[in-house]
Amino acid sequence: MTYGLSPDQLALRARARDLAQNLIKPNARRVDETEEYAWDNVETLQEAGFMGMTIPRAYGGLGLSYLDAVLVIEQMAACCGAAGRITVEANMGAISAIMAYGSEEQKRFAAEFPLSGDKPAICITEPDAGSAATEMTTEAHKQGDKYIINGAKHWITGGGVSRLHLIFARAFDERGEEQGIAGFIAVRDETPGLVIGRREPAMGLRGIPETEVRFEDMEVPQTMMLVPPSGLRRGFGDLIDAYNSQRVGAGTVALGLAQGAYDLAREFLLEREQFGRPIAEFQGLQWMLADMATSIEAARGLTYRAARSKGDRAGLFPDPVMAAQAKLFTSEMAVKVTNDALQMHGAMGYSRNCDAERYVRDARMFTIAGGTAQMLRTLIAGGELDMKTPQTRDGYTKLAERDPPGRTKPSVAA
Ligand SMILES: Cc1cc2nc3c(=O)[nH]c(=O)nc-3n(C[C@H](O)[C@H](O)[C@H](O)COP(=O)(O)OP(=O)(O)OC[C@H]3O[C@@H](n4cnc5c(N)ncnc54)[C@H](O)[C@@H]3O)c2cc1C
């Protein structure tokens, strides 16, 4: 199945698959067991041009599309979830926002990081502001030509290994008046007051640290404040538009994990014998396999459609509803498919000597991180009903907040 991919995209997918199978897969168990960030994998990704591939050519990248990146991420995640996530964050999320909204200086500055092997960190979630992200309390106060930032984030992917950070904070002017939520660009080890805190002992995807990140009187020059073109009042909405790229990327990692687990289970079914025949001959397992294959294909269709779509006003990022549908469906599918793959292995699937259990643990995060399954359903319903999604204090979608007529309708590029 070629999904209308161009010859260049098919070649890119084949190259990514080759590299993932030969160079990334052999490290996957080590990465999980040691819980150490795989710098050797990063080097492999960088040499292949997969770190920063979506960065425009003018800034040193390959100028590839989100769909191109998705094709690569899927192959990496099928072999190693952590490598898939590194590829997401080196091409989407923080770097996407900066390349779309940044000044010339910011774009030139930021592009260098993924291109030289850094996986940027995006810092939104706080201990008391998860799904209700706009309730964040991290504050940036203007003082002359700089901002002084105080606050704390948690569950920041790459804390302690990422260098470039995009930090969401409430911005205040010199009179102490709130201006809106903006992004601030800072670099670990070069910005006093950027402190990496406690690491979470995460269930899966253990090759990437999830940590607290604190800002203790951290100074960021005004030139490193990322303000979307429509200004600070709409700043959060625009920054979250950029996040839709990362949401598609996260769904793609779940897709790749499901495919990897499926491949493992299929092979096992053909090899393992019980009652004098390969277990693949039992209809009970055949039907499970058929459901797994079908739901993976459905997820792939939604993911590629979302990656091709353009939803925000400027057409820079995937459509929010399509991105939410792709991640919602794919993440729940991956939880089920990886679990079924483990089941098909019998006791062996429950052993840490078998990759099936790693796929289960790795897949579990995607119904939570980057918008929970519940919040994505609310977002999708808001799109269906032409209502704003709940970033309000009470968390409900309100009829009174219907988007005005003329809301940008999503489009999917051919
Ligand atoms: C592995 C991992 C990596 C992450 N990486 C990052 C990162 O790099 N950067 C970052 O900023 N954040 C990151 N996060 C944080 C993630 O985005 C948040 O966990 C997520 O937004 C949910 O917030 P919460 O955990 O505070 O849950 P809560 O918001 O407290 O939700 C708790 C439960 O209530 C439900 N709920 C909440 N509000 C509603 C509502 N209105 N309607 C229905 N149900 C609701 C949720 O769905 C959930 O089931 C990561 C999380 C994980 C697990």
Image (cartoon, helix red, strand yellow):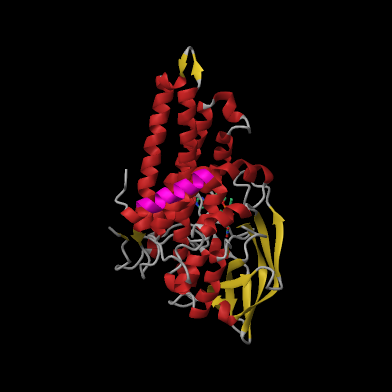
Please state which of residues 273 and 186 is positioned toward the viewer in this rendering. 273
Please state which of residues 46 and 211 is positioned toward the viewer in this rendering. 46
Q: Position of residue 204 (x, y in %)?
A: 60, 44
**Residue 14 belongs to the span the image colors magenta:** yes
- The answer to whether residue 80 shows anywhere in this view is no
Query: Residue 121 vs residue 268: left or right?
Result: right
**Residue 198 picture quarter:** bottom right
Q: Position of residue 319 (x, y in %)?
A: 37, 60
Query: Residue 196 vs residue 363: left or right?
Result: right
* Residue at 53% in and 65% down: 115
* Residue at 46% in and 20% down: 279
**Relative height, residue 86 to residue 26 (above, below):** below
* Residue at 46% in and 78% down: 231
Q: Position of residue 111 (x, y in %)?
A: 52, 70
Query: Residue 126 vs residue 58: left or right?
Result: right
- The answer to whether residue 86 shows anywhere in this view is yes
**Relative height, residue 32 to residue 183 (above, below):** above
Q: In the picture, which quadrant includes the N terminus? A: top left
Please state which of residues 251 and 162 is positioned toward the viewer in this rendering. 162
**Residue 110 picture quarter:** bottom right
Highlighted magenta segment, given as a residue range? 10-22
**Relative height, residue 81 to residue 224 (above, below):** above
Does the magenta stretch mainly form a helix, a strand or a loop?
helix
